[in-house]
C-alpha cells in the first residue's frame, strides 16, 4: 500500500505491559526467510502463468530469426540472427486514443459488414467488407450521402501508427521502417458462422507468407476479451504449427508487436460470442512496398 499519512502513522501511547521475552531471529535468518517466501510466490505465479498459457504482463521474448524470410536484406533494418522477437505491452493506447479509433471503425463499418463473421476496414485502399465481397468505403460515403472522414477525424490513427513505428524501431534496434499494406481494422463477430473460406480466420499462418511485404506486425486491441467477447485470443505456436507457446488475451490498449517471419506462426482463436475489435499495423524494410500517405483520401478540414 502507499505510505500512510503523518497522522495515521503516529501511534497512540498504550498502557505498559509486562515484558515477555521472545526468541529473536538473526538478520540473516529473517533475510533467508523473506527470500524463501518471495521465491515461493514467484514460482507459484510463474507456474500459474505457464498452466494458463496466457500473457498478462508486458513482456519481450527474443527468438532467432527465420532464415527463410526478410530477403533481400536491408542493412540496419531487416531482422537477423537472434534479433527477432515479440513484445506484449499493456496500456499502449490511451483512453482518448481508443475512443477515437473505435469511432473510426464504427463509422466506416456502418456502411458495410461481412456475412461470415469478419468485417475488414482498410482506409488506405478503401476496402470494406460487404456481405461476401469488398466495396470501397470512400465510394460508399459518396453513395450514401454520409460525410467522409476528414483529416481531423483520422489524426489519432496517424499518431498511433507513428508511435507504433517508433516503438518497433527502438524495441528491435532497427531504423528505416516503412508502413506497408494492408493496415486495417478488423471486427470478428461470434454470432456469424463463416460463409466462405476467407471467413475462417482461426487457421495458423505466417505473416510473411500471407502478406508478402510484412517485416514487423503490430496488433492493437480495441475491445476486452473478458467483457466484449469470449474466445478470440492470439496464440503463438511452435515451428510445427501445433503446440501453443503463448496465448494473449485482448485488452483495450494492449499492443502485441512481433517479427513477421516463420519464427512466429500464429492464429486468432475463434470468437465464441460478442465482437472482437482490433487494429493491425504492419511495417516493412522494403521502400518499394512502403505506404507514404496512407490516409490521403481523407477530406481536408475546411479553413
Image (tube, rainbow, N blue to C red):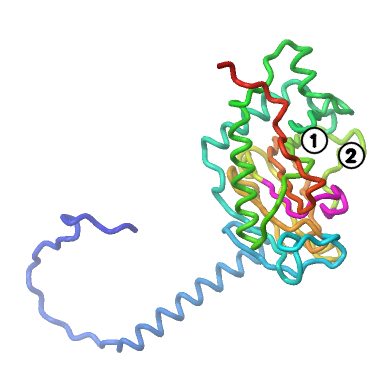
Give the farthest residue toward the top: 145
Q: Is residue 151 left or right of residue 22?
A: right
* Secondary element at tag 2: helix
Check disc 1 and report the residue beneath it. Answer: 118
Earlier along the polypeptide chain: callout 2 or callout 1? 1
Q: Quadrant of residue 223?
A: top right
Q: Quadrant of residue 133?
A: top right
**Could you tell me if the residues under marks 2 and 1 are in contact, i.e. CB atoms within 8 Å?**
yes
Residue drawn at (21%, 55%), measured in percent from left and top?
Answer: 5
How far is mark 2 from mark 1, CA to CA? 9 Å
Taking 297 as reference, is 1 left or right? left
Residue at the image position 74 percent from the left and 17 percent from the top: 141
Q: Secondary structure at mark 1?
A: strand
Q: Position of residue 280 (x, y in %)?
A: 72, 43
Image x and y of residue 246, in percent: 71, 61
Residue tagged 2: 198
What is the x, y in percent for residue 173?
64, 63
Percent across and percent down for residue 284 are: 76, 51
Q: Nearer the viewer, residue 157 or 144?
A: 157
Vertical relation: 26 (above or below) 249: below
Above or below, 120 against 150 in this view is below
For the record, the magenta segment spans 205-219
Label tally: 2
Q: Is residue 210 magenta?
A: yes
Q: Nearest the camera: 269 or 101?
A: 101
Amino acid at each position: 500500500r502507499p505510505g500512510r499519512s503523518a497522522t495515521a502513522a503516529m501511534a497512540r501511547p498504550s498502557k505498559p505491559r509486562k515484558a515477555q521475552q521472545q526468541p529473536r531471529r538473526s538478520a540473516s535468518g529473517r533475510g533467508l526467510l523473506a527470500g524463501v517466501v518471495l521465491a515461493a510466490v514467484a514460482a507459484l505465479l510463474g507456474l500459474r502463468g505457464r498452466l494458463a498459457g496466457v500473457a498478462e504482463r508486458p513482456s519481450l521474448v527474443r527468438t532467432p530469426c527465420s532464415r527463410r524470410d526478410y530477403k533481400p536484406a536491408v542493412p540496419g533494418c531487416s531482422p537477423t540472427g537472434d534479433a527477432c522477437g515479440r513484445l506484449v505491452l499493456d496500456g499502449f493506447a490511451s483512453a482518448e486514443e481508443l475512443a477515437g479509433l473505435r469511432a473510426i471503425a464504427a463509422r466506416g463499418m456502418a456502411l458495410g459488414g461481412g456475412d461470415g463473421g469478419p468485417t475488414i476496414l482498410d482506409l488506405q485502399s478503401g476496402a470494406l467488407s460487404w456481405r461476401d465481397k469488398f466495396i470501397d468505403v470512400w465510394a460508399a460515403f459518396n453513395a450514401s450521402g454520409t460525410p467522409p472522414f476528414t483529416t481531423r477525424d483520422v489524426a489519432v490513427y496517424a499518431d498511433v501508427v507513428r508511435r507504433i513505428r517508433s516503438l518497433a524501431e527502438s524495441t528491435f534496434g532497427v531504423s528505416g521502417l516503412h508502413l506497408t499494406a494492408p493496415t486495417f481494422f478488423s471486427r470478428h463477430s461470434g454470432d456469424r458462422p463463416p460463409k466462405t473460406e476467407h471467413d475462417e480466420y482461426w487457421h495458423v499462418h505466417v505473416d510473411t507468407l500471407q502478406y508478402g511485404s510484412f517485416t514487423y506486425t503490430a496488433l492493437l486491441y480495441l475491445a476486452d476479451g473478458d467483457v466484449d467477447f469470449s474466445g478470440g485470443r492470439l496464440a503463438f505456436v511452435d515451428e510445427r504449427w501445433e503446440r501453443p507457446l503463448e496465448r494473449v488475451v485482448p485488452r483495450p490498449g494492449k499492443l502485441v508487436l512481433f517479427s513477421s517471419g516463420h519464427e512466429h506462426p500464429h492464429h486468432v482463436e475463434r470468437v465464441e460470442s460478442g465482437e472482437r475489435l482490433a487494429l493491425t499495423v504492419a511495417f516493412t524494410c522494403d521502400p518499394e512496398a512502403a505506404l507514404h500517405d496512407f490516409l490521403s483520401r481523407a477530406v481536408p478540414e475546411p479553413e
